[in-house]
Image: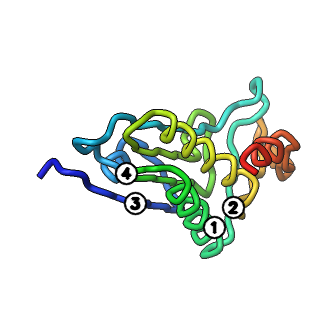
Amino acid sequence: DGRLRVARHHVEVLAGPLDPLAWLGEIAPTDETGALATFLGLCRGDGGRIEALELEHYPGMAEAKMTQIAETALARWPLFGLVAVHRTGLVRVGEPIVFVAAGSAHRDAAFDAVRFMMDFLKTDAPFWKREHLKGGIEGPWVEAKATDDAARAHWS
């Protein structure tokens, strides 16, 4: 009816391709929505060194942690909806890995919620990445970065 619709949150781990446009319907704008912020994380080639990333997760625990992070964001900011979708499996350079979107009356809440969600996904959700290098060489598992911990600490 065009009135305020609170979609709350949707989190999901996908084993196949991630289409960010398909998830925007989860936070469909209402008469009160003034901002829709999104983040789309892609597999990068690291200067031509990487051809893909292999992403693994701890089933059940990853979804539970994503839900916990989303619920924290919903409690912290006045959002109409929040979506977080994370890919697993082999992801080629240029393909989406993670999509986060938030809808709110104002841009600050939407931007902050998306950044918060990503900062905590990077440090707290049980996902692991292994590089697959050019020439079919299986590379190392990617280590956690101090910059990710610093970004998370910003929210304390």
Which residue position holds label 1? 65
- Looking at marks 1 and 4 on the same chain, the residue that comes earlier in the sequence is marked by 1
- Look at the picture and state if 70 lies above or below 37: below
What residue occupies the far bottom of the structure in this picture? 60
Considering depth in this image, is 101 or 51 the residue closer to the camera? Answer: 101
- Looking at marks 3 and 4 on the same chain, the residue that comes earlier in the sequence is marked by 3
Give the residue type at disc 1. Lys
> Given contact means CB atoms under 8 Å apart, are the residues at marks 1 and 4 in contact?
no
- Looking at marks 1 and 3 on the same chain, the residue that comes earlier in the sequence is marked by 3
Q: Kindly state the secondary structure of the residue where label 3 is placed.
A: strand
Q: Whole-Å distance between the Cαs marked 2 and 4?
A: 23 Å
Which residue corresponds to the image point at 63% horizontal and 67% vertical from the top-left?
Answer: 65
Q: Kindly state the secondary structure of the residue where label 1 is placed.
A: helix
Rendered image: mark on residue 8 = 3
Which residue position holds label 2? 125
Q: Whole-Å distance between the Cαs marked 1 and 4?
A: 20 Å
Considering depth in this image, is 98 or 150 the residue closer to the camera? Answer: 150
Which residue position holds label 4? 80
Which residue corresponds to the image point at 48% horizontal and 38% vertical from the top-left?
Answer: 38
Give the residue type at disc 4. Phe
Give the residue type at disc 2. Ala
